[in-house]
Image (cartoon, rainbow, N blue to C red):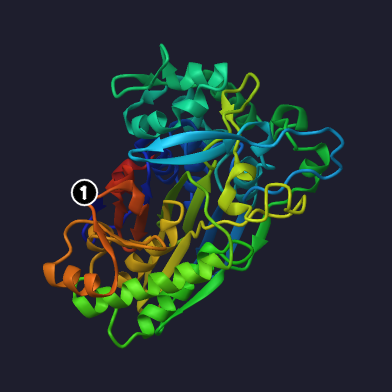
Amino acid sequence: MAVVGMGDGAALGLVAAGHPVTADAAAAMLGAGGNAWDAAVAAGFAATAAEPLYTSLAGGGFLLATGPGRAPVLFDFFTAVPGLGRVRPVAPPVAVPIAFGAATQTFHVGPGSVAVPGLLPGLLEVHGLLGSLPLAQVVRPAIEAAGLGQSAAPMVRVVSLLAPVMARSSTGAALYLRDGRPLGVNDHFHNPRQAAVLAEIAAGDRNGFSDDELGGAVTSADLDDYRVEARTPLSLDLTGEGGWTNPAPAFGGRLVALGLQRLLADRRGSDRRVPDGAVALADAMVAQAEARSRLVGAVQGTTHLSVIDRWGNVASMTASNGSGSGEFIPGTGIQLNNMMGEEDLHPAGFEAAEPGSRIPSMMAPTALALHGGDRVMALGSGGSERIRSTIMQVAADLVAGRLTPAEAVEAPRMHWDGSSLQVEPGMPIEVLAALEERYRVVEWDHQDLYFGGLHLVATPNVAVGDQRRDGVARVVAPADRVQ
């Protein structure tokens, strides 16, 4: 686990993210005197270069912003259903089986799986409204990351899973395969064509994509209609403590709130280290799952980053490209999302959703204000269906004050998958026995990214990156200030 802190010393800012390049981009902005939103936008751009199978300029996301004297706001730049004014026929998404060990899951990709993207306009909107540094400076780390590249080691597992999708196009194969095999730990990944697009963005010469570039069902009317929405976050009432998370039409925040409120009101307590508390936690997860079954599902690939700056401003951002469509914007190296091919998001069928409507999401960037607002935390997680349970159990520990941020992130997790309780190793024997009396328990032999990747920062100066998803943490010290 990546944990950093500075004791009682003052910090210029705190960062936790899913890749060193992403975290370093944010830290560079804080060191240059930028605020949390400069840092988050820089990290958002950099993540598309360093974590391209989790996020993309042609994907979507959410950013929760708050700070002293500022009403919290949730920027919704998630994907939308395409097809406004559509006249050309579009082939349905193509099924591609992907092997997950002994199990096989079918992904739906191709041009028909592409939704209207929102990440690029979202990052530009946040920067324009809240940023303080020049756009060119904010985008520079992403340009360098895409152009110079980095070790492929952090993406090897995901590349190996998605190799059949990447192999569908010459661009995907050139970027993610070497002589027909997925990238390995000793390979180098770089994307100079994306660097050129990022340079256009930095210069103010590009602020989106055309319908011809996106193809599929996306029309010029879709792009004209798309708006980044500034929403009032869902408030969390946590037994005297407070916080905010993602509101409707996303449903992840509502499930986090439901689980937390049920858990914190349970007389058995919420301490997952003791039998009664662990069973109460499992019961709350079942309640979350039952509520979720009345909604829709969750996207496959997500990444999260958390930032707090020296002024107490907070940015909590989660982004996704789904599992990727296998389609790339010509000449850019940028993979398009497959949100219209995610079966769980379209239970009534891929053609049933109304064009122009937002696609629902499990993503739930969150902020907590504890001890009367004296301690502020930003947190969130990737992990598809596990987002709701991961945030709930870590937040419950933080609200109760029984674990430090690092301990709460590191502690063994559980997740109810609808039929079994998946449990990480390290639970006390008496806790496992109590759970097994009530549930079918599947105990894992290792911590795994299946259980999410929760990256957390907390005032005064603690940052925690979740090693389940290669998390990294940065505390930007006064000595790191760029003169």
Residue 146 higher or lower than 139, as above or below: above
In the image, what residue occupies the spot 79% across and 43% down?
Answer: 83
The image quarter containing residue 85 is: top right
Q: 128 or 343, which lies in front?
A: 343
Q: Is residue 276 visible?
A: yes
**SS for dot 1:** loop
Return the residue at label 1: 446
Q: Outermost residue, bottom direction?
A: 267
| Relative depth, front residue between 126 and 336 | 336
Quarter of the rendering occupied by the C terminus: top left
Q: Residue at x 65, y 36 (%)?
A: 93
> Up-down: is 151 above or below 417?
above
- Where residue 116 appears, x then y in whole percent? 69, 42
Residue drawn at x 63%, y 31% is: 110
**Residue 406 percent across, percent down from the top left:** 24, 59
Q: Give whichever of 71, 274 is nearer the camera.
A: 274
- Measured as percent of width and height from the top left, residue 221 is found at 83, 42
Residue type of the residue flagged with mark 1: His
